[in-house]
Amino acid sequence: MKTECRRYVMQKNNAWAQETDLTPRGDKEYNEVYNGVNYREFSINIVERLTSWECNVKRLHTTLAQNHTVIISKEATRGSFFGECTCGLARRDAVPCEHMAAVVCSSRIAGLTRQNIMPFWWTRKQWQQQLPQEVTSFCCANMEEIRSNYVPDDFMRYCPSWSAPKKAGRPSKGKRRLSSLEIAQGKKKKPRPLTRFCQICRGFSHQTIDCWYQEKNKHHRPMTWTMEQAMIEDAMIQSADPLPIWAGQQWQGSVDVDEEGGEEEGTAD
């Protein structure tokens, strides 16, 4: 409890120590957003709607560049005009993308600046609202006083972080830091291949490398599949046998060699 009180006082002093527009983390995100952004490298078309500006932004001199749409609201949310972009970076990282930064740097929308396009949660004003000056932290480490002055809430439970299971092993150093939105969304499932086609059996349920007709995959063959293949092979062998010819039966158009020779001898006489 004393540690939490000291941490609260330290954060409150940092929030009210300076009069800058952005927090220290906001300044870091601000520099990363506008570092190297040149609006002359983008094609920007702005259309004014009833409640927002719709901007079509595309990078020039690049054959693989896509056309993205930036939507900026005309009404500020807690002093911020932070909008959306179809590229998805603004929604994932909660900071303006390069398309939104190019629109701001072009100065084609009146009243839109580099400061007020940043999200309101990176502003010092929002930080100060979370840590007001008139609120003081009270630390009471005496259990007798806590039991005498406070009533326990039976519906509330606290699970400390050290009681939760953790992944074994040392974490990798080169791992990318995930944003709060990525942590909330969780891991994405691996997309399945769109098309599957086997060049051996002409099936669409698997790929060629996993086909059971290959000898290297014979240990994957189920017993039912092996029995069905044996029955199919027996049926093919039986269907390939010639039809039985009974005694005295001849094919149409066939000629007996002895009779033919006998007829020839008779004509020669």
Image (tube, rainbow, N blue to C red):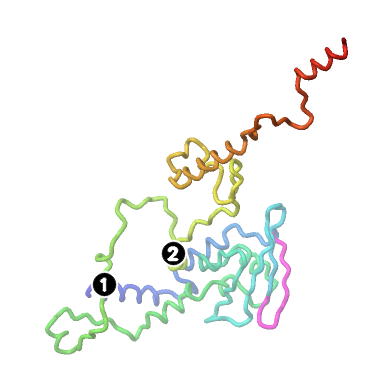
Amino acid beneath label 1: Cys
Q: Position of residue 4 (x, y in %)?
A: 27, 74
Number of the label disc, if any, that sits on residue 159: 1
Q: Mark 2 or mark 1, which is nearer the start of the sequence?
A: 1
Q: Looking at the picture, tell me which residue is in the foreground, 143 or 132.
A: 143
In which quadrant of the rendered image does the C terminus lie? top right
Looking at the rendered structure, the number of numbered marks drawn on it comes to 2
Question: Percent from the top left, x then y, of residue 222?
Answer: 44, 46
Instruction: Check disc 2: other Cα within 10 Å, few if <14, some if 14-19, many if 20+.
Output: few
Q: Are marks 1 and 2 in contact (CB under 8 Å)?
A: no
Residue found at x 44% / y 55%: 176
Q: Is residue 120 above or below residue 191?
A: below
Q: Secondary structure at mark 2?
A: loop
Look at the picture and state if 103 lies above or below 150.
above
Residue on which disc 2 sits: 186
Residue displayed at 37% across by 73% down: 14
- Helix, strand or loop at label 1? It is loop
Which residue type does callout 2 highlight?
Answer: Gly
> Which segment did they paint magenta?
42-53
Q: Is residue 16 magenta?
A: no
Label 1: how many residues lie within 10 Å, few (<14), some (14-19) or many (20+)?
Answer: few
- Viewer-closest of 62 and 189: 189
Q: Is 57 left or right of 123, judged from the image as shown? A: right
- Quadrant hosting residue 267: top right
Q: Is residue 236 above or below residue 257?
A: below
